[in-house]
Image: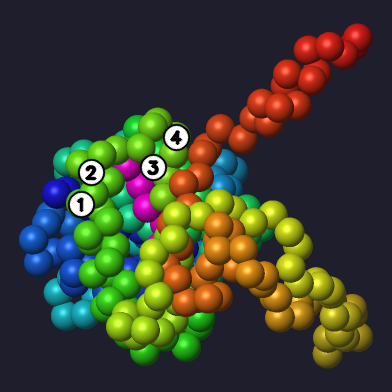
Amino acid sequence: MKVFLTNDDGIHAPGLWALYRRFREEHSVQVVAPDRERSAVSHGITLHTPLRTARITVNGGWEGYGVDGKPADCIKLGMTLLLKEKPDVVVAGINPGANVGISINYSGTVAAAREAALFGLPAIAVSINGYDIEDYGDAAAFTERLARRIVETPPPFGTILNVNLPNIPMKKVRGVKITRQGIDRLSKEYYEKRIDPRNRAYHWLGSDARIFGEDLSVDGDALCHDYITITPLQCDITDYRMLAQMKAWDV
């Protein structure tokens, strides 16, 4: 396979290069990723400033392009300019921190996969449920197997697979669940007001711990019960139920 890797954590992130190590064993791999942390930028693109790219060498010889833009920018630049050959599959990740529920709406990792799907490519977004991650190897191996499957059986145009793995050894994982996105707001968010050294106020977003339920058909619930979750997501966000209702409106 010809594999295009990206992420939202920056080109030096360990999750990205865990994927690189795994895929390069048997596949052709190209990397275009942000040159720094770009988490939670969603599907933003750069319009009003120029984009700069640099060929970056990491880990004693592995190479990729670093882009001073967002994850979606990396897909656009890669597909239109930087890549030497069209990829068979795009993988975004491996992201530390789960992308489930409403968090999907903010995720740069998921947005990179969505942008790839708009180019007509099979695409996977991959995250691990935690930040203190000792080893990305099992997650990378699972992703490689799933990438083979999605290339063999591509999803419909505009559909991606959003994958989340529990932060435990693979032998303790209870299985794989095909899930739907949860849309409940499962934690209380707040802004903490602080004062800077010049006596000006600023605000810092925080949240309480998320509480998940028992419905194993929902991404966050299944993940917190130690299942790997795979959720198909569409770029088309039309509410077709409402569309049918609105046809009767006198507007």
Crowding around mark 4 (Cα neighbors within 10 Å: few <14, some 14 to 19, many 20+) is many
Mark 4 or mark 1: whose residue is earlier in sequence: 1
Residue located at (8% from left, 61% from top) = 26
Which of the numbered marks, if any, corresponds to residue 116?
3
According to the picture, the residue beneath numbered tag 4 turns out to be 158
Q: Residue flagged by tag 1: what amino acid is it? A: Arg
Residue type pointed to by label 3: Ala
Q: Are marks 1 and 2 in contact (CB under 8 Å)?
A: yes
Examine the rendered structure and indicate whether residue 245 appears above or below residue 11. above
- Residue 151 is marked as 2
Point out the tag, 1 or 3, that comes first from the N-terminus. Answer: 3
Where 240 sits versus 61, above or below? above
> Left or right of 122: which side holds 249?
right
Label 2 – label 4 distance at C-alpha: 15 Å
Asked if 240 appears above or below 204 in the picture, the reply is above
Q: Position of residue 108 (x, y in %)?
A: 52, 57
Highlighted range, magenta: 122-127
**Disc 1 marks which residue?**
148
Within the image, what quadrant is residue 173 found in?
bottom left
Q: CA distance from mark 4 to mark 1?
A: 19 Å
In the foreground, 112 or 149: 149
First in residue order: circle 2 vs circle 4? 2
How far is mark 1 from mark 3, CA to CA?
A: 17 Å
Query: Depth-wise, is mark 3 or mark 4 nearer the camera?
Result: 4
Residue 219: image quadrant is bottom right
Distance in Å between CA atoms under marks 3 and 2: 14 Å
* Residue 10 part of the magenta segment: no
Mark 2 touching mark 4, by CB under 8 A?
A: no
